Image: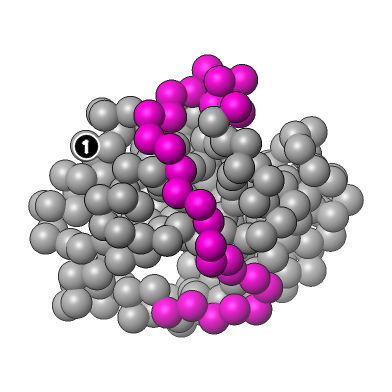
């Protein structure tokens, strides 16, 4: 059985998403955003409480507020973090961006050598997740869609009642809107949406009431 739990971390209140499997005790983190020791301990304790082993680090996109804990956990569990190639430049400049936003990044990021791309089907903790590339918030923003369990992890592409900002590096408002309409709003109403910030929502609720996609 697959479990999913967002953990709110860092001054930007990022939803770091933990996925785990009760039987195999495998866990994957999407957006390892836990910068600083208090946030790091949140993840460590959650893993220890359920006796979980972290086996993967994936990213919805590579803005600095979403990668802050990556250096520490990649090293601890010997993992290769994976995001979309089009966001690699953000990852490479993350330390500089951390200073720009007043964020603490204590551990250096390991070089990213593996990437996810459109239509990849990943097996995370025994569950299938399809990679959906929706640029606009950042050039390499992706969503992870679990069609069987009916949830999608969207990062900063879509929020409850809103969408991601498009005024940062490589942002594009038109691309973001068309991507959301073509690739997310074509999903069933009851698919649960886990955004990178703020509360979870559903595709149906956003289709009905999100002013940006009417
Ligand atoms: Zn972002």
The residue that disc 1 covers is 41
Depth check, front residue: 57 or 173: 57
Which span of residues is magenta-colored?
A: 96-123
Q: Does the magenta portion include 209?
A: no
- Mark 1 neighbour class, 10 Å CA radius: few under 14, some 14 to 19, many 20 or more: few
Asked whether the viewer can see residue 198, the reply is no
Picture quadrant where residue 68 is located: top left
Q: Position of residue 24 (x, y in %)?
A: 19, 77
19 sits to left or right of 41 = right
Q: Is disc 1 placed on a helix, strand or loop?
A: helix
The x and y percentages for residue 82 are: 51, 61
Q: Is residue 68 visible?
A: yes
In the displayed structure, 207 sits above or below 101; it is: below
Q: How many marks?
A: 1
Magenta span main SS: loop
Q: Is the CB of mark 1 within 8 Å of ligand 1? A: no
- Say which residue appears at 34% left-offset and 80% top-offset: 126
The residue lying furthest to the right in this view is 174
Q: Nearer the viewer, residue 188 or 13?
A: 13
Q: Position of residue 190 (x, y in %)?
A: 53, 69
* Position of residue 214 in the picture relative to residue 122 (left or right): right
Which of 113/67 is in front?
113
The N terminus - image quarter: bottom left
**Residue sitting at x 53%, y 62%:** 113
> At 39% across and 43% down in the image, what residue appears?
71
Q: In the image shown, does 181 or 113 lie closer to the viewer?
A: 113
- The residue drawn where x is 40% and y is 53% is 17
């Amino acid at each position: 059985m697959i479990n999913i739990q967002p953990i709110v971390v860092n001054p930007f209140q990022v939803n770091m998403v933990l996925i785990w499997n009760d039987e195999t005790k495998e866990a994957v983190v999407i957006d390892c955003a836990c910068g600083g020791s208090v946030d790091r301990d949140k993840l460590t304790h959650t893993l220890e409480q359920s006796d979980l082993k972290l086996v993967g680090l994936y990213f919805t996109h590579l803005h600095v507020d979403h990668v802050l804990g990556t250096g520490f956990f990649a090293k601890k569990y010997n993992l290769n973090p994976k995001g979309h190639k089009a966001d690699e430049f953000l990852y490479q400049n993350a330390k500089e961006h951390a200073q720009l936003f007043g964020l603490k990044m204590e551990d250096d990021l390991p070089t990213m050598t593996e990437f996810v791309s459109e239509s990849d089907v990943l097996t995370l903790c025994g569950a299938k997740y399809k990679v959906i590339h929706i640029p606009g918030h950042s050039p390499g923003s992706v969503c992870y869609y679990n069609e069987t369990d009916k949830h999608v992890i969207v990062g900063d592409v879509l929020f409850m009642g809103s969408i991601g900002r498009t005024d940062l590096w490589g942002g594009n408002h038109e691309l973001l809107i068309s991507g959301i309409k073509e690739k997310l709003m074509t999903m069933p109403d009851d698919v649960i949406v886990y955004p990178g910030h703020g509360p979870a929502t559903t595709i149906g609720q956003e289709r009905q009431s999100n002013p940006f996609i009417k």
